[in-house]
Image (tube, rainbow, N blue to C red):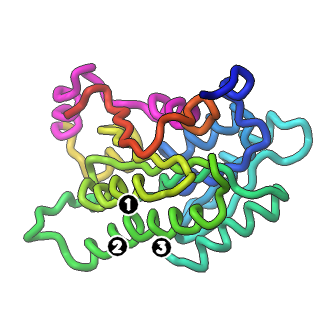
Amino acid sequence: MASASRASGSLQDRVAIVTGSSRGIGREIALHLASLGARVVVNYTSNLAQAELVAAQINSSSDGSPRAIVVGADVSDPSSVKSLFDEAEKAFNSPVHIMVNSAAVIDTKYSSIPDLSLQDFDHIFSVNARGAFLCCKEAAKRLKGGGGLWRQNHNDYVVSGGVIEIWAWGLRSIQGFCGDNGPIATDMFFAGKTDDQVKKAIDESPLCRLGQTADVAPVVGFLATDAGEWVNGQVIRVNGGYV
């Protein structure tokens, strides 16, 4: 059982890597973890300017020492993932405590299986499944017992995301979670969708709205604190009851 002091909900001085945090859900998670006291690695693949804005927002409220750094990394590349952890440890002179896998891609054409090209299939799995695997693998080497790992899952890439649900069970001594977020109002969600498709998603939600990034981040924040240590190996459905 967590003691009263450990259950305070603070992440003071813990180091968190958030992949894909230049925008969308990852951005909101990075900002929220920082608000709880964490030092954050803002990761990006191609959106350097946006990543720098996220880090600047975090550092604007610091007492002088940087609370966030920006590190570019392709999560589908093993050496790049290793460098991501190396940069985090070097910058903050500390091991990584929290790993959030938020980097993801979708097929914006929403192809049916007969129409999905092998190139698109490989790209989706290289980021969503291979990338998550590489980050989980590196985290398993570096995070100490009690560290936490969160992986986003989305209906838009349910097959590759389903692989991650299995991996959430395989991290010894590390809290592992998979987040099933349902439809969240991000650029990635809206990409390639018609107004009718967006309306359908809203109509199918029991709460009659799309989720917001701010609906997801506090859940990740709670699970990253000591107060959430007894929650482990679960698929956390932060989806407003969306089926």
What separation in Å lies between label 3 and label 1 (alpha carbons)? 12 Å
Residue type at mark 3 is Ser
Residue type at mark 1 is Val
Q: Which residue is pictured at 27% across the width and 20% down the height?
A: 207
Q: Nearer the viewer, mark 2 or mark 3?
A: 3
**Horizontally, is 61 left or right of 156 in the view?**
right
Query: Alpha-carbon neighbours of circle 1 within 10 Å: few (<14), some, or many (≥20)?
Result: some
Q: Which residue is pictured at 81% across the width and 64% down the height?
A: 90
Residue at the disc numbered 3: 76
Which residue extends farthest front? 1
Q: Is residue 12 above or below residue 47?
A: above
Q: Which residues are magenta?
A: 196-222
Q: Could you tell me if the residues under marks 1 and 2 are in contact, i.e. CB atoms within 8 Å?
A: yes
Query: Alpha-carbon neighbours of circle 2 within 10 Å: few (<14), some, or many (≥20)?
Result: some
Q: Earlier in the sequence, mark 3 or mark 1?
A: 3
Which residue extends farthest right? 64
Question: How far across and down, in percent of the image, does residue 91 sit?
Answer: 81, 60
Residue at the disc numbered 2: 123
Q: Earlier in the sequence, mark 1 or mark 2?
A: 1
Q: Nearer the viewer, mark 3 or mark 1?
A: 3
Residue type at mark 2 is His
What separation in Å lies between label 1 and label 2 (alpha carbons)? 8 Å
**Dominant secondary structure of the residues highlighted in magenta in the image:** helix
Question: Of helix, strand and loop, which one carries label 3?
Answer: loop
Q: Is residue 81 above or below residue 215?
A: below
Question: Of helix, strand and loop, which one carries label 1?
Answer: loop
Residue at the disc numbered 1: 105
Whether residue 187 is in magenta: the answer is no
